[in-house]
Image: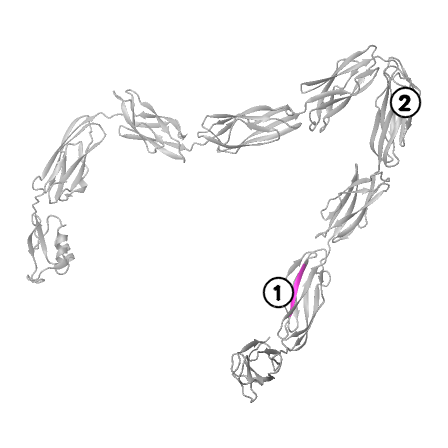
């Protein structure tokens, strides 16, 4: 065994072989030819050898290759020493464990495991040999009992080891085989997909009927969201039994596996557990209130029900539609599953007419927001019935009026009419026009032979109103269908007619001797006088109005008869002649670019007092006109101005003038105005400019055409001229928009200079515009004025002062000039070759009468310019 191991221990001990027995060194040998007997192992090599050898197997090979027997003093304990398996179904397997523990300080090796008894087995054969470590090392053996037939069975397990104290241990084995119990053949549940919380009814099915005492079936679920009983019993003789799976609510959808086990067989069923979702149900999606009297509230209810598996929260209820309101619930409102709440919807119309609205409920229910369509119609309340006359003598008509509490809605409001006496007839109904609060009708009264009272009734919406009319008998009477005829506005020179009915309402005939008419434009026809009408007989008189001039006209129809109510009856006539719009014209029918056009509206007759209004319109936003003009009183025309904006494409504008039902049009062609570019200067003169002294002037570019102009480039020529700052090109200028070009002149040499600024654009005129440039470079001459103060005191009187100059930063001073001490002020002007861009240092020294200079003054530095 050491043949391969010893070389790994290092060169100093490669040939050393050791045999260990009872944890002592028994033998050591060396090969004299490799290592002298006197050579010793020391230090780390020896320590390593001892550690490695302590882990070697219990039997090692000696130096000569012969086997040396091992004697182990260790011992181990077996627990338990007897296994009783009880009753196990034939074909099933039961297992129990045996514990092996080393109680000694030496390792114990288990070399074999022998089982007697055909129904018993041990599962650790492949692990042999098994080593129990010293001082408490342990190993667990699993022993199985698998009866092949019913009845008692015995056996034993023999455990062989190298222990000197108990080399072989015996464990007795016993058990009883029982006839095989039925196994689970199926597991089903009512629902494979459930929304929690809920319960699911499940059942197990056995492969055969349960024996006496029943068959126990173990149940389990792999998901805490689904709980089942730990077990259930299929009754004796039965093959199925049921149980309930309890499903809890989950926040995410998941799958639970339910398992049933019996008779060594298992069956599973998967239950999909879904997230409980809230649901909201409305008792109705429409609430119709029908006709409701104005300012009279009525209510209906809407029931909200939580129909989901989770509580539903109604966050808000919003309402639209005039007159609708809600009450009965406060939001947000949470309803548990199955819980309901009642919402009261009220309709209290403030005005007549159909009203539509909507109730919108926002909740956490799946799907869109719940809505309830609301509708109702506010209807006026009939408040009064009155007639012009409370008493009528003989035949005639009485004008009556029905009144409502509020204006009628679109389509009008119908009021039913009736009379309780045949002597007075009224229409079956009268309609109050939309927007009106009253309507009139005529009650036709026949002659009566005795005084009597008639009750007129008006009914609408269940609210009646009455009026009492006293009828008195009459003799010969004449009734006129109206006391006034109004023709309203009538176009000049356009005849229109109305009818006046003359009726004999007395008990006898009435004779109409004459009918005369007054008032410009009024005339009558249709009847020849004198005319006799029998009782209740009528004749129609045609009244015509044909105005020749504009303005209000009045007249009168005078009827002379033998009526007992009066020999003379008058009918007032009125009408207004209005001109007719006959033409609309403009000065220009074609306009290019922006501008104005003078237009005129013409009527067929002079306007009356107050003038005649004509409405104006344009179908094109590029042409604007006043909303209306007024033809002055006495005039037949009126002018106005059409303002035209520039257009980018040619187009047509239609101007329309309207008055009454008559319209006149004029077509105006709009043309595209070409782009043009204007310059504020064609020349720029800079005049004299000092050399190397840049100066600038600017040129303003203006879009002067009717459409945008694009300046594509700006270039410049000429020595000393350049473009600086200003706009960048290309640039597009809308009409009247400007851009600035800045031109700089910076001469470097003296003398006159010329140049040209060239501007290229898409201008329809002068697309390449030029600006002449000129200037003169002038050499600059500079003077430097130096001033100083005399010394405050001097023992040697000062006669004069010398002024010295040096290029700045150097010491090469030169005398520039001298100034007398008597000069006032003390100053000196240096004009001696002053160079632009240079800096100079100046000092002053005082000089006495002997010509002796003083020490220099402080240094003054100047930079040119």
In-front residue for pair 837/367 = 837
The quadrant in which residue 790 appears is bottom right
Q: Main secondary structure of the magenta part?
A: strand
Badge number at residue 547: none
CA–CA distance in space, label 2 to label 1: 95 Å
* Image: magenta residue range: 738-744
Q: Is residue 743 magenta?
A: yes
For label 2, count other residues whose C-alpha is less than 10 Å away and answer few (under 14), some (14-19) or many (20+): some
Spot occupied by residue 427 in the image (x, y as percentages of width and height): 76, 19
Report the residue marked by disc 2.
559
Query: Which residue is drawn at the image coordinates 8% and 55% (left, top)?
Result: 63
Q: Is residue 841 magenta?
A: no
Tag 2–tag 1 contact (CB < 8 Å): no
Callout 2: SS: strand
Report the residue marked by disc 1.
725
Spot occupied by residue 42 in the image (x, y as percentages of width and height): 11, 59
Q: Is residue 599 left or right of residue 678?
A: right
Callout 1: SS: loop
Query: Which residue is drawn at the image coordinates 89% and 26% (left, top)?
Result: 557
Label 2 or label 1, whichever comes before in sequence order: 2
In-front residue for pair 26/250 = 250
For label 1, count other residues whose C-alpha is less than 10 Å away and answer few (under 14), some (14-19) or many (20+): few
């Amino acid at each position: 065994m050491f043949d391969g191991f010893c070389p790994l221990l290092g060169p100093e001990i490669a040939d050393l072989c050791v045999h260990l027995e009872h944890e002592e060194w028994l033998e050591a040998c060396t090969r004299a030819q490799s290592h002298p007997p006197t050579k010793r192992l020391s230090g780390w090599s020896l320590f390593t050898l001892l550690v490695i050898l302590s882990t070697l197997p219990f039997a090692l090979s000696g130096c000569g290759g012969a086997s040396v027997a091992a004697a182990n003093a260790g011992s181990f304990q077996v627990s338990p020493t007897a296994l009783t398996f009880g009753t196990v179904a034939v074909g099933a397997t039961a297992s129990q464990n045996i514990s092996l523990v080393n109680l000694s300080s030496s390792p114990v090796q288990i070399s074999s495991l022998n089982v007697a008894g055909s129904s018993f087995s041990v599962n650790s054969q492949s692990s042999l040999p098994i080593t129990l470590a010293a001082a408490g090392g342990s190993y667990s053996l699993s022993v199985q009992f698998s009866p092949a037939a019913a009845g008692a069975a015995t056996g034993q397990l023999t455990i062989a080891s190298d222990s000197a104290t108990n080399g072989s241990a015996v464990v007795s084995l016993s058990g009883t085989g029982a006839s095989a119990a039925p196994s689970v053949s199926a597991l089903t549940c009512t629902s494979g997909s459930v929304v929690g919380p809920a319960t699911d009814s499940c059942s197990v099915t056995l492969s055969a009927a349960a024996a006496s005492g029943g068959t126990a079936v173990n149940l389990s679920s792999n998901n805490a969201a689904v709980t089942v009983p730990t077990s259930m019993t299929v009754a004796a003789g039965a093959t199925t039994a049921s149980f309930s799976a309890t499903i809890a609510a989950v926040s995410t959808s998941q799958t639970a596996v339910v398992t049933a086990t019996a008779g060594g067989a298992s069956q599973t069923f998967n239950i999909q557990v879904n997230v409980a979702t809230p649901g909201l149900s409305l008792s109705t999606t429409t609430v119709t209130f029908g006709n409701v009297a104005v300012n009279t509230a009525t209510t209906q209810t809407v029931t909200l029900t939580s129909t989901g598996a989770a509580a539903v929260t109604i966050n808000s209820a919003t309402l639209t539609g005039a007159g609708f309101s809600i009450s009965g619930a406060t939001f947000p409102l949470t309803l548990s599953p199955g819980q309901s709440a009642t919402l009261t919807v009220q309709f209290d119309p403030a005005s007549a007419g159909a009203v539509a609205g909507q109730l919108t409920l926002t909740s956490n229910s799946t799907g869109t927001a719940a809505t309830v369509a609301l509708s109702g119609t506010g209807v006026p309340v009939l408040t009064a019935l009155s007639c012009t006359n409370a008493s009528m003598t003989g035949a005639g008509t009485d004008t009556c009026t029905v009144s409502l509490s509020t204006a009628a809605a679109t389509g009008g409001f119908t009021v039913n009419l009736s009379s309780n006496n045949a002597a007075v007839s009224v229409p079956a109904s009268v309609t109050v026009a939309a927007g009106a609060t009253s309507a009139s009708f005529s009650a036709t009264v026949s002659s009566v032979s005795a005084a009597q009272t008639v009750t007129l009734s008006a009914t609408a919406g269940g609210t009646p109103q009455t009026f009492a009319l006293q009828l008195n008998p009459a003799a010969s009477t004449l009734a006129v269908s109206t006391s006034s005829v109004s023709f309203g506005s009538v176009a000049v020179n356009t005849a229109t007619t109305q009818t006046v009915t003359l009726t004999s309402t007395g008990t006898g005939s009435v004779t109409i001797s004459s009918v005369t008419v007054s008032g410009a434009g009024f005339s009558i026809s249709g009847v020849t006088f004198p005319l006799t009408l029998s009782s209740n007989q009528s004749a129609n008189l045609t009244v015509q109005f044909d105005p020749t001039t504009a303005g209000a006209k009045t007249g009168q129809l005078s009827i002379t008869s033998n009526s007992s109510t009066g020999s003379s009856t008058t009918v007032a006539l009125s009408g207004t002649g209005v001109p007719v719009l006959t033409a609309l014209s403009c000065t220009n029918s074609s306009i290019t670019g922006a501008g104005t056009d003078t237009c005129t509206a013409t009527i067929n007759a002079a306007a009356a007092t107050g003038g005649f209004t004509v409405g104006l319109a344009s179908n094109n936003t590029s042409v604007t006109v006043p909303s209306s003009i007024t033809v002055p009183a006495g005039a037949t025309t009126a002018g106005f101005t059409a303002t035209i904006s520039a257009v980018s494409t040619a187009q047509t504008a239609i101007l329309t003038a309207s008055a009454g039902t008559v319209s006149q049009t004029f077509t105006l062609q709009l043309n595209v105005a070409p782009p043009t570019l204007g310059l504020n200067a064609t020349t720029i003169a800079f005049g004299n400019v000092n050399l190397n002294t840049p100066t600038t002037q600017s040129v303003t570019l203006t879009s002067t055409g009717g459409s945008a102009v694009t300046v594509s480039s700006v270039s410049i020529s000429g020595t000393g001229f350049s473009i600086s700052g200003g706009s960048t090109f290309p640039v597009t200028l809308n009409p009247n928009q400007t851009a600035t070009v800045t031109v700089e002149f910076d001469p470097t040499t003296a003398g006159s200079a010329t140049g040209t600024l060239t501007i290229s654009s898409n201008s329809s005129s002068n697309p390449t515009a030029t600006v002449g440039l000129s200037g003169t470079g002038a050499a600059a001459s500079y003077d430097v004025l130096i001033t100083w103060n005399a010394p405050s005191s001097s023992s040697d009187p000062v006669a004069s002062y010398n002024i010295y100059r040096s290029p700045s930063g150097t010491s090469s001073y030169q005398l520039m000039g001298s100034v007398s001490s008597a000069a006032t002020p003390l100053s000196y002007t240096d004009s001696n070759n002053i160079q632009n861009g240079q800096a100079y240092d100046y000092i002053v020294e005082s000089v006495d009468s002997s010509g002796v200079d003083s020490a220099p003054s402080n240094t003054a530095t100047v930079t040119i310019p």
